[in-house]
Image (cartoon, rainbow, N blue to C red):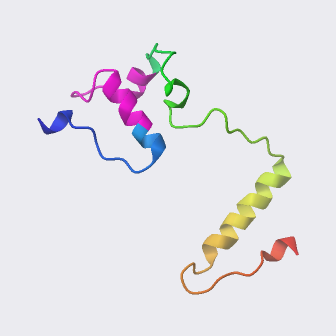
Amino acid sequence: MERYKPKKCKSPAKAIREFCIECMGGRGSGQNYTRLIEECVSINCPLYDFRFGKNPHHTQNLTAEQRKERGDRLKFARSHDKGKEKVAKFPLLS
């Protein structure tokens, strides 16, 4: 009976995906869950647009320069110790 229990999820996107899997037939043995979700025809469901784990209403149109800047900022943030010291300012923007 354990296989019929939905898995505990922490992120909303994963919770929506789990709900869709359960709605389309649950977790059986050897099923392709992406295919189950693709075959959903319940367009009146409020989660229909979010079933693939992405918010369709949140799109960003970034230029190549903006993408590079964000990537550099992310690399810089990951390179510093997050717990001990706080970075005052991003050096590439000054």
Q: Residue furthest bottom?
A: 84
How many tags in the picture? Answer: 0
Residue 24 lies in the magenta stretch? yes
11 with respect to 89 (left or right): left
Q: Position of residue 62 (x, y in %)?
A: 80, 45
49 with respect to 11 (left or right): right
Q: Which residue is rendered at x = 74% and y = 59% of the image? A: 70
Q: Residue furthest left?
A: 1
1 with respect to 34 (left or right): left
Q: Position of residue 47 (x, y in %)?
A: 49, 28
Residue 13 lies in the magenta stretch? no
**Which residue occupies the foreground of this view, 45 or 62?**
45
- Choose top left, top right, bottom left or bottom right for residue 20: top left
Q: Which residue is rendered at x = 63% and y = 32% of the image? A: 56
**Which residue occupies the foreground of this view, 74 or 60?**
60
Q: Which residue is rendered at x = 58% and y = 81% of the image? A: 81
For residue 86, above or below residue 60? below
Q: Position of residue 14 (x, y in %)?
A: 43, 42
For residue 40, above or below residue 17? above
For residue 60, above or below residue 76? above
Q: Which residues are magenta?
A: 16-37
Q: Which residue is rendered at x = 11% and y = 35% of the image? A: 1
**Which residue occupies the foreground of this view, 53 or 73?**
53
Quadrant containing the C terminus is: bottom right
Q: Residue furthest top?
A: 41
